[in-house]
Amino acid sequence: MGALMLQGTGSDVGKSVLVAGLCRAFANRGLGIRPFKPQNMSNNAAVTIDGGEIGRAQALQAIAARVEPHSDMNPVLLKPQADRTSQLIVGGKVRGTLGAGNFRAARGELLGEVMAAYHRLREACDLVIVEGAGSPAEINLRAGDIANMGFARAAGVPVVLVGDIDRGGVIAAIVGTRAVIDPEDAAMIRGFIINKFRGDPALFADGYRQIEALSGWRGFGVVPWLPMTARLPSEDAVILEARALRHEGRLVVACPILPRISNFDDLDPLKLEPEVELRMVPPGTPIPAEAALIVLPGSKATIADLAALRAQGWDIDIRAHHRRGGAVLGLCGGYQMLGTRVSDPAGLEGPPGSIEGLGLLDVETVLSPAKALRHVRGTALGARFEGYEMHMGETTGAGTARPLAIFEDGRPDGAVSADGLVTGTYVHGFLADAAQRRALLARIGAQGSGRDYRASVDTALDSIAEELERHLDLDALLAPAQTRKP
């Protein structure tokens, strides 16, 4: 068969979810599917079966396609750090650090590795569904592009443009894209999809026809607003800015939104718990005094985020919470922050230096270039769990003599404070297991529901696939993809 690429009229138009839904829909038809994103920028990542890391969205899309995530699915990943720099991941492995300016010069050199990964996927399946990044209408970024039309043209992959009607201006967004992009780029586009429509699609029939007439592209359908997407892990930190609804009688779990927060989907399983209210705390807002548990999340720049935490006064809130007998959990970078000191002698996250930690765990961390990337299973708090490690640095100290977890291979992980109120772990996905979540919630007086988070995600993917079958012409979408492999 071949490949099909979804590009958007802008960021956050729903490309990631649509690719996941199409992966599941076509997998349900019996096709061998692989997701692919040439270049991604995200601090939410997952460990792959081959020991690399890729963007969280591509890992979810692999689950949708019912295959194991592989580093070929996202060959170039940028993880923003501080001072306009990003960690560069190529083929699942750290290759160094790039600034905003020199990446534009360097990215063209990565096209060969992007194409090699793409061709390996093509050989392994019936159909590759490709996700673009940002928008092809960002013509100021076109030179050296490997994320959108630069890739599509090099690989000969037909493109479908996605427009978000919920944000308004979708007619101008699609027709305007046609107007500003290069004619040869425009020739790669086979049609468009209208996404996130609320209400009766018949009300947009005239607008739909006008887009077809003005752009010269056919429409493949109008996708309604999909509430089940709230059950999927998000890759974009923009979603964290939404304020949580207040629920009387529920125990509050609070998590501060740090500037370089990463893998915040670790907290998504808590949304399944009827007795728990998860509050993501934005800058300028104190951590609520009524919180039963404070979670410090992962971070792509631990030292910078720890400084930002202090600047917000959240360190005062956390210590006051602990003095009142409140529980604290640190995940990966959050675990490092709970110790007595974090040091970066090699300047991996910024200028070399060190910073005093919160001192709630008797451990200290030294950041190092070697990155731990592995799937793990084990026992913690008397319950089983599985997840993955993804961190740079080694944490040592007397507190590690009271580990939170023991892996199947016998290695200890994390630490527990002498009073038992403060815990830390390097394990991502720690809360996805119902038994582990129940054990943690029991420590703050909540009854875990026992709901299966992974099953919840899988059910949501099936529901999205059903909606796409209903509202898109999937046979017509497959037609341009049915090309011979180059």
Image (cartoon, helix red, strand yellow):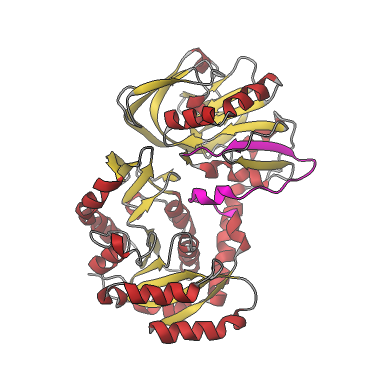
Q: Position of residue 324 (x, y in %)?
A: 71, 21
Q: Position of residue 442 (x, y in %)?
A: 71, 31
Q: Residue furthest right?
A: 249
* Vertical position of residue 116 compared to residue 212: above or below: above
Q: Can residue 429 be seen?
A: yes
In front of the other: 370 or 364? 364
Q: Which residues are magenta?
A: 231-259
Residue that appears at 50% across and 38% down: 387
Residue 243 as seen in the image, left or right of residue 469: right
Q: Residue furthest top?
A: 398
Query: How many numbered discs, if any?
Result: 0
Residue that appears at 48% across and 54% down: 60
Quarter of the figure with residue 86: top left
Residue 356 as seen in the image, left or right of residue 154: right
Residue 472 as seen in the image, left or right of residue 141: right
Q: Position of residue 157 (x, y in %)?
A: 30, 70
Residue 252 inside the magenta-drawn segment:
yes
Q: Position of residue 28 (x, y in %)?
A: 50, 67
* Vertical position of residue 324 compared to residue 255: above or below: above
Quarter of the figure with residue 396: top left
In front of the other: 388 or 411? 388
* Vertical position of residue 177 compared to residue 392: above or below: below
Residue that appears at 64% across and 48% down: 243
Residue 289 inside the magenta-drawn segment:
no
User: On the rendered image, what quadrant is the C terminus found in?
Assistant: bottom left
Q: Can residue 1 be seen?
A: no
User: On the rendered image, what quadrant is the N terminus found in?
Assistant: bottom left
